[in-house]
Image (cartoon, rainbow, N blue to C red):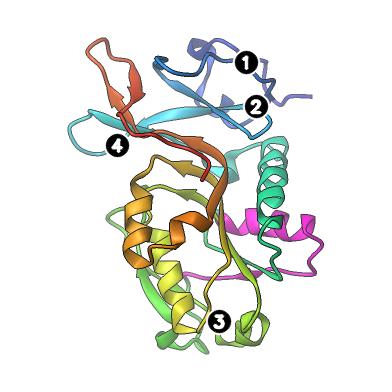
Amino acid sequence: MPLVPDRTSPHDFRPHDFWQVVYPAGTFASGAGQAWRDLYPAALPDGRQIALPIRVLPGDGSAAVASLIVNQASFAVEDALCDAMAERAARFEPEVVIGVPTLGLPLANGVARRLGHDRMVALGTSRKFWYDDGLSEPMSSITSPAHAKRIFLDPRMLPLIGRRRVVVVDDVISSGASIRAVLALLAKAGITPVGIVAAMLQGERWRATLADFDPGVPAIVTAALASPRLARSEDGLWSPEGEAFSFG
């Protein structure tokens, strides 16, 4: 049973109602020419929809994104995301799943389990005393632009991922800055992922960021959901800012 009432009118949603229900395909209006006020309906590969809140980005208030916060989602939504992500990850025939902190970690766990793996490998942003600073990279994200941190690979994990087919799992790829830092970190360990799987691709700006790192990287990126970057129109509604967007 849903954890919240089946609220199909965008105006009926309360803040804690988002990310709670996997709705049947076509529950919310979507498609070319559509605009939204508070809610963006992201579609899973099978057409089912998840209601995401629209968050205005810092600045002049003219740009926004659809937000996905996995640790506030219901287990039903998390399971649906992991199912779709595991199906896409399986195409890369991975031997190891690497999770990106923070919200990519529960998803990596779910994907690895569905692929039949015994474990996953977690990157970290908290430095342990046995870590090597040479296996770290500075990292920032669109949701926390003022809080730069470092991402680390535990050197004890190197035997698990060396010369293996590795897939990286993250929650949202937006600007591409975070996943680029992950790629740079893995490169220091001699690791080149065969695939990158996200719960959601947010807009298309990540493509240029990752192509600048390696022109072949965008081709190995895929996701369970895709959402456009949004621009405010004169009537106060939000619509795609003009970029194409896809699952990858």
Residue placed under numbered mark 4 in the picture: 57
Residue 180 x/y as whole percent: 39, 64
Residue 157 figure quarter? bottom right
Residue 158 x/y as whole percent: 60, 85
Tags 1 and 2 touching, CB below 8 Å: yes
Up-down: is 20 above or below 177? above
Q: Real-space Cα distance between discs 3 and 4?
A: 34 Å
State the SS at label 1. loop
Q: Real-space Cα distance between discs 1 and 4?
A: 28 Å
Q: Amino acid at mark 1?
A: Gly
Q: Real-space Cα distance between discs 4 and 2?
A: 27 Å
The stretch in magenta equals 104-125
Q: Real-space Cα distance between discs 3 and 2?
A: 38 Å
Q: Real-space Cα distance between discs 1 and 2?
A: 8 Å
Q: Amino acid at mark 4?
A: Leu
Residue 244 figure quarter? top left
Residue placed under numbered mark 3 in the picture: 154
**If you read the primary sequence from the N terminus, does the residue marked by circle 3 or circle 4 appear first?**
4
Residue placed under numbered mark 1 in the picture: 26
Front: mark 1 or 4: 1
**If you read the primary sequence from the N terminus, does the residue marked by circle 1 or circle 2 appear first?**
1
